[in-house]
Amino acid sequence: MADCIIIEVKHLRKVYPAVVAVDGISLDIFEGEIFGIVGPNGAGKTTLIECIEGLRKPGSGFIRVKGKDPVKDGYALKPHLGIQLQESALQDRIKVWEAVDLYASFYTHSLDQKILLEQLGLAEHRDRPFARLSGGQKQRLFIALALINEPDIVFLDELTTGLDPQARHATWDLVREIRSQGKTIFLTTHFMEEAERLCDRVAIIDHGRIAALDTPENLIKSIDAENRITFTVGIKENFQPESLSGINGVNRVETRGEGFIVYGRGDELIKELVGFLTETGIGFSNLNVQKPNLEDVFLSLTGREMRD
Amino acid sequence: MRGVWKLTLVEIKLFLREPMAAFFTLVFPLMMLFLFGSIYGNKPVAFFGGIGYVDTAVPAFTAMIIATSGLLSLTIQVATYREKRILRRLRATPLRPQAILSAQVMTIFLMTVLGMILLLVAGKWIYGVRFSGNAVSVFIAFTLCSLSFFVLGFVLAGLLPTARTAQVAAMVIFYPMLFLSGAAIPLEVLPETLRNYTQFLPLTHVVTLLRGLWIGDGWGDHLTEVIFLTAMLIVGLVVSAKTFRWE
C-alpha cells in the first residue's frame, strides 16, 4: 500500500435538526486501500460518505479528496470519482445498455461499455429494463455506472444490503477485483463480516463518532477476546473435561449437551488442545473454532450488539 | 453538453415506452378529435363565430395536451424521480443541476409539440381544419403556455412530500380544470354563469389565447391572457426555485 493520502477528513461535523449525524470525525484514506466504515444503521455512515463525495455540505470541518474540496471543486473532482448510492434507483424502463451508455456520456473519458458489461456479468442482460433486474443485477449495474468513467476512488454505500449470501460473496470478489486495478475503495456496511473479509482498514463508528480505527486483525486482537472451541467425544463417560485445564491458554471448560466448550487465548491454544486430545486417544469429532470477530469488537467498544 | 442531449434522448424513449404518459399526451387527444369530429363535423357554424367545431377543437385540445404534460406527466415524473433517488444519482455525475432539469423540460416540451403535430395532421387530413393565424405567433404562444404549465408541475412536485400525494393533487387540479376551461368541451357550451367563474382558470387563458391566435387575432386582443400566463410563469419559477428538492 502506497502511503499516499488520497482522502483527508478533519473534525467533520454535520448536524440535522433532530440529530448530530457526524460528530467530529477525522480520517486519512491511503491510495489503493479498501477502507470500510462500519456501524449500525443511523450511526452516520451515509452522511459521512456523502459529505466526502460532495453530495452533502459538511456543517464544519475540513475535507480534501485528491487535494480538492469536494463542495467547492465538486465539478473538477467528479470525473475522478465513482459513486454508488445507498437505495438509489434508475428509471424503471431504462435498459441496462442504455443506462451505461447514458452515464458514459456524462464524462469526457469512459471505459469500453461492452467489456465493462461483460466483466460485471451483465452482457446477457443488456436489453433488460432496470425494473426487471434482480437485486444483485441492479447492484452490479450500479457498480458499472460507478466504474464507467475509470475513477481513481470508488465509493460504495451499503453495497450488499438486501443481497442474498451468494450475490454478496460475488460482489466481494468484484470489489477486490476493482482494487486490484489500483483504485481506492471507500465503503460503508453494517455487516461486520463484510468489513472483516473485505477491508484493509476499518473505522467502527457509532453515534457519529469513530469508536476504533485499524486493520480488522488489530481491532480483534485489541479486545483480547477468548477463542471458543467446541467438540464432541465418542464415549462421554470416558472423558474428564477437567483434564483440559492443564493445557496452556485454556481458561475454562464447559459441558454442553453432547459436547464440550473450551474457552481460552493464545495462538498455540488449538494446536495444544488437538495434541492433547489426540494423545489421550479419546476420539474427538465435530471440532469447531470460533474466533472473536468484529462483532465482538463492536460489542466490547459500545457495550451493545450490532443488531438494530 | 453531450450528456444533456443523451439524457433528453433517453427520456424521450422512456416516455414513449410508458403507456400511460404516451397515451394521454399523444393518443387520447386524437381519440377526442375523432369522437367529437365525427359527431359535429367541421362545417362553419354561427355558434362558433363562423368556423367549424374542429377549427376550435384543435387549439383547445392542444391546451389539453399542455395541461396533461405540465400537470400530470411532469409532476409525477419529477416527484417519482426524486422519491426513487434517480435525481440524486444524476447529481453524483459531473452533469450540472440545471442540465438535469433542462433535459426533463425539453423532453416533455418535445412530446407536447409532437402531440400538437399529431392533432394538426389529423385535423387537416380528415377534417380539413382551417388556420387563419400566424404560425410563428401560435408557436410562441404555445411555448409560453407550455412553460407556464411546466413550472406549475415543478411547484406541485416541490410542495408535495411524496410522488403519490403529488399525483393525487395534480389530478384534483387537472380534471375539473380540463372540463371547465374549454379545453375538453367548448366554452360556448358552458352556461354563462359558470363561465363567469371559469374564466379565471389558468387553462381557460391557454384555451382563449390559442383559439384566438388560431383564427388570426392579434397579440393586442389577448393581453390579459399573455400577462396572466407570464405572471404565472415568473411566480412559478420563484416558488419552485425555493421549494424544489433533490431528495
Image: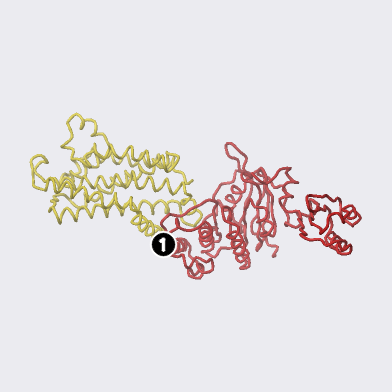
Badge 1 sits on which subunit? B
**Amino acid at the residue labelled 1:** Arg
Quadrant position of residue B162: top left
Q: Relative to A81, does residue B63 appear above or below in the rendering?
A: above
Looking at this rendering, what residue extends furthest in the right direction?
Answer: A246
Q: Position of residue B229 (x, y in %)?
A: 29, 40
Q: Residue at x 24, y 33 (%)?
A: B198
* Residue that sits furthest to the top in the current view: B193
Give the percent coordinates (x, y) of residue A277: 86, 61
Q: Quadrant of residue B193?
A: top left
Quick one: label 1, few (<14), some, or many (20+) residues within 10 Å?
few
Give residue B12's position: percent from left, percent from top: 35, 57
**Does residue B27 appear left or right of residue B106 in this picture?**
left
State which quarter of the image contains the N terminus of chain B: bottom left
Residue in the image at 89% along x and 57% along y: A248
Give the chain ID for the red colour.
Answer: A
Between B177 and A75, which is closer to the camera in this rendering?
Answer: B177
Q: Nearer the viewer, residue A137 or A147?
A: A137
Left or right of residue B247, residue A65 in this image: right
Q: Is residue B227 visible?
A: no
| Residue at mark 1 | B2
The chain drawn yellow is chain what?
B
